[in-house]
Image: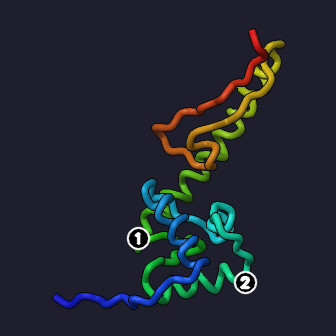
Amino acid sequence: MQTEQVATTALTEQESAIVSVLLYFDMFDHPLTPEEVAECSKVPLHEQELNRALNNLVQKKLVFNIDRFYCLKNNPGIIAKRIRGNALADIYLRRAGIVSRFVSWFPFVRGVIISGSLSKHYMDHGSDIDFFIVTEKG
């Protein structure tokens, strides 16, 4: 059985930040677009350097690029799952908007905030809508 050798070169600060972001989202099988990677990075990543770093990571075979998404697994199935989850989230967001407007009419409610998977613009058929409801004291 033949194994692939991965180059053992040091990662740049930008590459390391990208891998850190992808590692976190990899736990949830949630691939990211370049914009989402930049948004979640602790290191500022401007478009040109982001694209350069992502391309380097793909060439080093540390990151995979499937369609418009980046992830640590070469698994097109997680891309399809993400796309389905985003489409379902669009439907649930409309429902959540109706419910949150209704709840906000109560005089003691100061804010209604969507949380959970829907706040990440992802839902699956077993998901529910999670809200944080901020009320006035007392």
Q: Is residue 133 left or right of residue 56?
A: right
- Where is residue 12 drawn, in percent x and y? 56, 83
| Amino acid bearing label 1 | Lys
Q: Which residue is mark 2?
A: 48
In the picture, the disc for residue 53 is: none
Q: Which residue is mark 1?
A: 73
Position of residue 118 relative to residue 75, above or below, is above
Alpha carbons under labels 2 and 1: distance apart: 24 Å
Q: Is residue 131 left or right of residue 127?
A: right
Q: On the rendered image, what quadrant is the N terminus found in? A: bottom left
Q: Secondary structure at mark 2?
A: helix
- Where is residue 81 drawn, in percent x and y? 48, 57
How many residues crowd mark 1 within 10 Å: few (<14), some (14–19), many (20+)? some
| Amino acid bearing label 2 | Gln
Please tell me which residue is depicted at 78% across the width and 27% down the height of the picture: 111
- Where is residue 59 drawn, in percent x and y? 49, 89
